[in-house]
Image (spheres, rainbow, N blue to C red):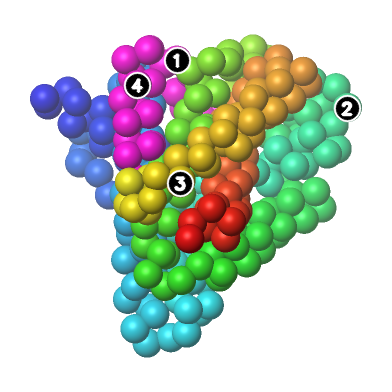
Amino acid sequence: MKKEIRIFYTAVMFFTRIPCPSFTDHDPEYLNRSSKYFTLVGMLLGALCGLSFWLAVQVFSPPIALLLSFAVSLLLTGAFHEDGLADVCDGFGGGWTKLKILDIMKDSRVGTYGLVGLGLVLAIKFAALSEMSVEMMIPVLISGHAISRLTSVSLIYTDEYAREDLLSKSKPLATKMSHQDYLIACVFGLSPLLLMRNYWIFLVIFPLILTKLYFSRYFNKWIGGYTGDCLGTVQQISEVVYYLSVILIFKYLVC
C-alpha cells in the first residue's frame, strides 16, 4: 500500500504543482508505474476546476467563472500540457525532418505556430464549454480532464518513445505501461462518464479512439514515435474533441 501511495504521489508531482510529500521523487521505476494514475490525477484536476467554477459562478457570470476555472487549471498544472501543444505546433509546423522537428520542440521559445495553435485550442474549449449549462459544468470538467488523459496515456501503452528524443531528453517521462496498469488507467478514465447520467455519453469513446489513432500514425510517420510534448498535445486535442462530442450528443441524441 505504501508503495502504491508513493506511485500515486509521483503521478501528482509529475502532472501538477500540487505539493507532495518529501519522499516523492522522479525515480524511473515509480514514474513508469505512475502512468496508471494519470487519469485519476485528471479526475482530481477536473474536480478542482469544477469546484473553482462553482465558487466563481456564485459571484460572477458563467463566462467569467469559466475563465477563472481555466486559470486554476493552468496554475495547478503549470500549463504542462499546453506547453507540449505549443511545442508540437512549432515543431511539426516548422520542421521537415525528424531531427529538425525534435530540435524545434526542445526550444523553449514559442513561435507563431505554437501561439496560433494554443490560442485556437483554448478558444474552442471556452466556446464549447460556454454552450453547456451551469449544472453540466462540473461533471463535464471532471470527465473531460480524465478521459482526455486516458487518450494520451494510450500512446504510452501502444507506441514507442521516439528514439532520437529518448537519447537526449532532459525531462523525466513515463515511457512504459503494462496491460494491468493500462486497465487501471481505463477504469479511472472512463468511470467519470457516469457523472453525465446518460448512457449516450459513452459514444464519445469513438471520436477519441479516432483522435488517438490519427496522432499515433502522424507521430510515428514523422518522428518514429511520441515524445512528452506529443502526449500533452493529444491530451489537449482530446479534451476539445470530448467537449465538442458532448455538445453533439446532447443536441441530437438526448431528448
Residue type marked 3? Ile
Q: For numbered disc 4, what is the local secondary structure?
A: helix
Q: For numbered disc 2, what is the local secondary structure?
A: loop
Label whose residue precedes the other's in the sequence (2 or 4): 2
Residue type marked 2? Trp
Q: CA distance from mark 4 to mark 3?
A: 20 Å
What residue sits right under mark 2 in the picture? 96
Q: For numbered disc 1, what is the local secondary structure?
A: loop
- The residue under the point 69% across, 28% down is 214
Q: Can you give x and y, in whole percent of width and height, for residue 245 in the image?
A: 58, 49
Q: Are marks 4 and 3 in contact (CB under 8 Å)?
A: no
Magenta segment, which residues? 170-192
Q: Can you give x and y, in whole percent of width and height, for residue 92 in the image?
A: 79, 34
> Relative to 24, is 237 above or below?
below
Residue type marked 4? Leu
Q: CA distance from mark 2 to mark 4?
A: 36 Å
- Can you tell which of label 4 and label 1 is closer to the viewer? 4
Mark 2 neighbour density, 10 Å: few (under 14) some (14–19) many (20 or more): few
Q: CA distance from mark 3 to mark 2?
A: 39 Å
- The residue under the point 38% across, 50% down is 198
State left or right for residue 77 relative to residue 220: left
Q: Are marks 4 and 1 in contact (CB under 8 Å)?
A: no
What residue sits right under mark 4 in the picture? 183
What residue sits right under mark 3 in the picture? 201
Label whose residue precedes the other's in the sequence (4 or 1): 1
Mark 4 neighbour density, 10 Å: few (under 14) some (14–19) many (20 or more): few
Residue 142 in view: no
Q: CA distance from mark 4 to mark 1?
A: 14 Å
Q: CA distance from mark 1 to mark 3?
A: 30 Å
